[in-house]
Image (cartoon, rainbow, N blue to C red):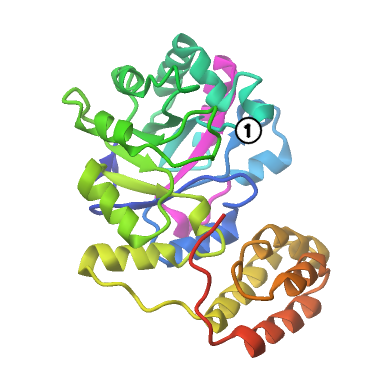
Amino acid sequence: MKIGSVDLPARPLILAPMEDITDAPFRLLCKRFGVDLMFSEFVASEAVIRKIGKTLQKMEIHPSEHPYGIQLYGKEISAMVESAKIAEQYQPDLIDLNFGCPVKKIAMKGAGAGMLRDIPQLIKMTAAVVQATRLPVTVKTRLGWDENSKIIVELAEQLQDVGISAITIHGRTRAQMYLGEADWTLIGEVKNNPRMTIPVIGNGDIDSPVKAKLAFDRYGVDAVMIGRAAIGRPWLFREIRHFLDTGEMLPPQLVRDQVELVREHVAMSAVGREELRAVRSMRRFFAVYFKGLPDFRETRVKLLQAESFEEVNELLDQIVERWGRMPAYIGGL
């Protein structure tokens, strides 16, 4: 599969960009387990052009992360164009435009999925960014704003016509947020539309090897993108790849193996950070790692309150001692 000039293997597995989740340490863990393409956390175009330090840091790329895309969002065309030019300087392999984020503070201000309420502006913005950068431009979006405006089939054609190199479709409307089941039938309609020639990437509810294979076989998508299911379970990508290649399921990951991965994740998060900040940055992951273990609530609370590496490691030792031989939890958020 190709996205512009970017070569990917057959049936690629893509890590979804997730704010406060897909930072460099988490991306690198997922890369080790077989991710074929990754993205930055989504980056605000206005913050890029104002050169906000924290925002610019989100665009920094480790050499081992390629192929890699920087995802931008915003509601002003001029800011999106200028931020794409700045992002290009960080040497990503592609630029992705976020027209799918459903979060109220973004969508209700006209950015992210909010762009789905102004399709002419969305198309105009996309065309301007495509013309402004030499990199392939992709789009991530949803089926539509709500149940009465599922316009993705027509929208995908319009986006292809202005020059995007691939489209990722989350199988929900903005109104659904993350509730209910993703509707893959419309994703399949986009892929099977004879007018479509660019890769179509499906996203939504892929949390097992079986579901990933079904997405490829039933709906014909060129790639699948996985987000929330990988939080606390980065080895999901290895499980899926093995199943796609062999038709066999890997044996379950054990909690003791998961603990070793968490220790490494903590160590990676500590690079370039003072201890307290590094430990606190892991809390969003501690809330999901080990989810589903019996009688784990008290230990999880202690992990979320820990403020030193020593505290964390002591708790991880206790987890191995009590639950180490159990299968690790098999789902994310």
187, above or below 154, in the image: below
* Residue at the bottom extreme of this rendering: 321
- Give the percent coordinates (x, y) of residue 220: 22, 42
83 or 44: which is nearer to us? 44
Residue 315 forms part of the magenta stretch:
no
* Residue at the left extreme of this rendering: 194
Secondary structure of the residue carrying numbered label 1: loop
The reply, left or right, for residue 263 in relation to residue 302 is left
Which quadrant of the figure contains the N terminus?
top left
Q: Which residues are magenta?
A: 60-87
The reply, left or right, for residue 290 in relation to residue 120 is right
Q: In which image quadrant can residue 273 be found?
A: bottom right
94 or 216: which is nearer to us? 216
**Residue 208 is at least partly visible in this image:** yes
Which quadrant of the figure contains the C terminus?
bottom right
* Residue at the top extreme of this rendering: 120
Residue at which label 1 appears: 103
Task: Identify which amino acid the numbered label 1 is placed on.
Answer: Val
**Residue 8 is at least partly visible in this image:** no
Residue 73 forms part of the magenta stretch:
yes
Residue at 77%, 73% (x, y): give it. Answer: 298
81, above or below 14, in the image: above
Residue at 31%, 52% (x, y): give it. Answer: 12
- Give the percent coordinates (x, y) of residue 34: 38, 63
314 or 130: which is nearer to us? 314
Q: In which image quadrant can residue 77 be found?
A: top right
How many marks do you count on the picture? 1
- Give the percent coordinates (x, y) of residue 297: 73, 70
